[in-house]
């Protein structure tokens, strides 16, 4: 079976090839550095399935083009599927499968890294000390013990964050339409407005849907404790970046840590260091000393990449064998 693998970086090839070598009948993997879009969909010519990542565009026109090429399945190397038009895929009879959980602790640990770095300003201290500046001005942090952490989305990653922050001695609040007993054992479930008003740190761990796009907007930012920290390692469009910039400028928001950005597809996972970046919103974010941005690397651990590769092949084998796929994504 021939698979077109889009947005393929060296590390994707390494882990997929390693897993493919363990397959009794290895797949023919055709790697494409390009991300999937209507312009690149022709690379799937002659392939039975495609394998994509977070910023590949898998909308209705792309799915229709794939269908015409004879593609039978879309295999996501990630958990989030906001970039796939599930209804359109279902209409065309295309199987869409994802990797629902690959080391949620990896994303949780990165979330905590953002919190710790912003709080104690280690990103600034690193540069200062290298330049022989040992002044402490501007590096003042808060003791996390006893502070309140509000977790929006208390699923696998939210729960893992709650456990770590609980270990620091923080009070844990959660907001989730379907709370889990495991979370309620360590955190108090509250409504969104109350979580925003009471938390010193707010961290987002829910999926992106059309209905919660910009759920952290100007109004919600206005409810947050003055000086609170906002963290997003989930999906960029959960927060209205322009509103966040205004909240930072007015000093209402104390710090911002993001691993995802609503317009990340033209930036993240590419080397743009020799280019002039014309995204003024992103560039404005880069000017704040209390903003830390990483390029969607929350998942990026050896364990997670191994799990992604293994589950991707399990999903592909469902297509090969015509069996029902436990990781299929269906329209709710
Ligand atoms: P999960 O499915 O275990 O948990 C998500 C939780 O969010 C569920 O409990 C659900 O009820 C809740 N939820 C849904 N809509 C909500 C809303 N409007 N408000 C509050 N809660 C809501 O998912 P998991 O594994 O914890 O992943 C969460 C998200 O993290 C993914 O959807 C993905 O966007 C992101 N992610 C980011 C990665 C990175 O590298 N930065 C890697 C993997 C996932």
Image (cartoon, rainbow, N blue to C red):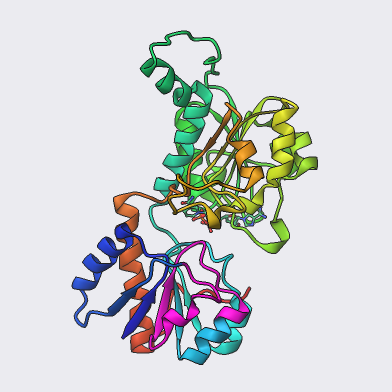
Residue 101 percent coordinates (x, y): 43, 59
Which quadrant is home to the C terminus?
A: bottom right
Residue 209 percent coordinates (x, y): 65, 62
- The residue lying at 32 percent from left, 76 percent from top is 30
The quadrant where residue 246 appears: top right
Q: 56 or 82, which is in the foreground?
A: 56
- In the rendered image of this protein, does residue 15 appear above or below residue 330? above
**Most distant residue in the top direction:** 135
Is residue 205 within the magenta segment? no
- In the rendered image of this protein, does residue 37 appear above or below residue 72? above
The answer to whether residue 187 is seen in the rendering is: yes
The quadrant where residue 22 appears: bottom left
Q: In this view, does 86 lie to the left or right of 113?
A: right
Which quadrant is home to the N terminus?
A: bottom left
- In the rendered image of this protein, does residue 270 appear above or below residue 331? above
The part of the chain drawn in magenta is 35-62
Residue 223 percent coordinates (x, y): 77, 35
Residue 16 percent coordinates (x, y): 29, 67
Q: 149 or 57, which is in the foreground?
A: 57
Instruction: Count how many numbered circles sit on residues in the image.
Output: 0
- The residue lying at 50 percent from left, 61 percent from top is 54
Q: Is residue 59 left or right of residue 106?
A: right
- The residue lying at 19 percent from left, 80 percent from top is 24
Please identify the dominant SS of the magenta region. Answer: loop
The answer to whether residue 191 is seen in the rendering is: no
Q: Quadrant of ligand 1?
A: bottom right
- The residue lying at 38 percent from left, 70 percent from top is 32
């Amino acid at each position: 079976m021939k698979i077109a693998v889009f947005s393929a970086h060296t590390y994707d090839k390494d882990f997929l090839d390693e897993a493919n070598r363990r397959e009794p009948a290895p797949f023919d993997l055709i790697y494409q550095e390009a991300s999937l879009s209507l312009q690149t969909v022709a690379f799937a010519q002659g392939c039975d399935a495609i394998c994509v990542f977070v910023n590949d565009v898998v909308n209705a026109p792309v799915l229709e083009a794939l269908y015409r090429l004879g593609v039978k399945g879309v295999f996501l190397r990630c958990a989030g599927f906001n970039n796939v038009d599930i209804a359109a895929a279902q209409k065309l009879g295309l199987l869409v499968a994802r990797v629902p959980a690959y080391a949620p602790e990896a994303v949780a640990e990165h979330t905590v890294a953002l919190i710790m770095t912003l709080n104690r300003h280690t990103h600034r201290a690193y540069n200062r000390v290298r330049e022989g500046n040992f002044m402490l001005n501007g590096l003042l942090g808060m003791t996390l013990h006893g502070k309140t952490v509000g977790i929006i989305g208390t699923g696998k990653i939210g729960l893992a964050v709650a456990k770590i922050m609980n270990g620091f001695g923080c009070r844990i609040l959660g907001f989730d339409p379907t709370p889990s007993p495991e979370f309620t054992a360590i955190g108090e479930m509250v409504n969104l407005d109350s979580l925003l008003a009471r938390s010193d740190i707010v961290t987002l761990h829910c999926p992106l849907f059309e209905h919660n796009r910009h759920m952290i907007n100007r109004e919600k930012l206005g409810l947050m404790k003055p000086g609170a920290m906002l963290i997003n390692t989930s999906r960029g469009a959960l927060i209205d970046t322009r509103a966040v910039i205004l909240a930072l400028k007015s000093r209402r928001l104390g710090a911002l840590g993001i691993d995802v950005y609503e317009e990340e597809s033209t930036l993240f996972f590419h080397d743009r260091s020799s280019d002039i970046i014309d995204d003024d919103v992103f560039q404005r974010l880069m000017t704040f000393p209390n903003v830390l941005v990483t390029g969607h690397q929350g998942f990026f651990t050896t364990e997670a990449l191994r799990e992604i590769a293994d589950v991707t092949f399990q999903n592909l084998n469902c297509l090969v064998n015509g069996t029902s796929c436990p990781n299929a994504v269906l329209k709710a």
